[in-house]
Image (cartoon, rainbow, N blue to C red):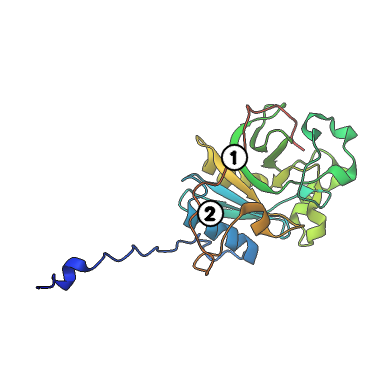
Amino acid sequence: MALPPATAAARPLAAIHRFERANFGGEPASLDARHVADWVVDSGNNGRRPFAIVDKLAAKVFVFDARGDLRGAAPVLLGLARGDDSVPGIGQRKLSSIRPEERTTPAGRFVASLDRDVHGQEVLWVDYDSAISMHPVITSDPKERRQQRLDSAILTERRISYGCINVPVNFYSSVVSSTFKGTDGIVYVLPESRPVKDVFASYDVDGPAASKNHDAAEPATTSPIDYRAK
């Protein structure tokens, strides 16, 4: 009995996945920031939208376009208190009622978009329910020395806000606003009290545990609420 040609029985090789990474363009970044950025680009977790990574331990933000190319990076001011969760209902409370230990910047994956605060100023809303936004640094209270803190290389100096992410004025206008204009995006706030993989279910790009996960759930969103920037 004649055997069929070997080529007829051969099975096509499985497509080889080419791992993709974020392009930091030489900008210094922590291992956690690179891990999350690479995972976002390789998995497509950003849904082809611009995204930002807020590294709380480094007090630094990285803003990327939809392809994962860095648009810019800058120091940030963060919540006074360490912690990765917001107090339930804190977004509905007056600033004067928020205790120092409640002034946290929550970690997680947030669908973000530009809108106005109660004063009519543009901000990038990150977590509507908790009244967390990214906005130009607020310098209305000289006692807080926010601009000086933002300019400081001492990371503990960068913890002062009620939870919002304060960035340099020029950086907001030239990078944040221009990148997120006309589209929503994703903001990934890295945790400071637990591993990043516990928050994002991320994987090491090209590592042994790398796997595709295109089904990551997006947080529920509501219409923007006009909280004051803080």
Residue visible at 77% across and 58% down in the picture: 152
Lower sequence index among marks 2 and 1? 2
Q: Amino acid at mark 2?
A: Val
- SS label for mark 1: strand
Give the crowd class for mark 1: few <14, some 14-19, many >=20 residues within 10 Å. Answer: many
Q: Is residue 76 visible?
A: yes
Query: In terms of depth relative to the viewer, which is nearer, 5 or 79?
Result: 5
- Residue 41, above or below 125: below
Q: Give the image quarter of residue 116.
A: top right
Marks 2 and 1, Cα distance to the nearest angstrom?
14 Å
Q: Mark 2 Cα within 10 Å, few/some/many (few <14, many 20+)?
A: many
Q: Mark 1 sits on what residue?
A: 111
Is 106 displayed left or right of 29 in the figure?
A: right
* Element marked by disc 2: helix
- Image marks 2 and 1: residues in contact by CB distance under 8 Å: no
Quarter of the picture holding the C terminus:
top right
**Is residue 68 visible in this depiction of the protein?**
no
Residue type at tag 1: Val
- Mark 2 highlights which residue? 40
Q: Position of residue 192 (x, y in %)?
A: 75, 57
Q: Vertically, is 60 above or below 170?
A: below
Residue occupying image coordinates x 89% and y 33%: 96
Q: Residue at x 83, y 44 (%)?
A: 103
Question: Residue 178 at what x, y percent from top left?
Answer: 53, 41
Query: Where is residue 222 shown, x and y percent of the image?
Result: 63, 29
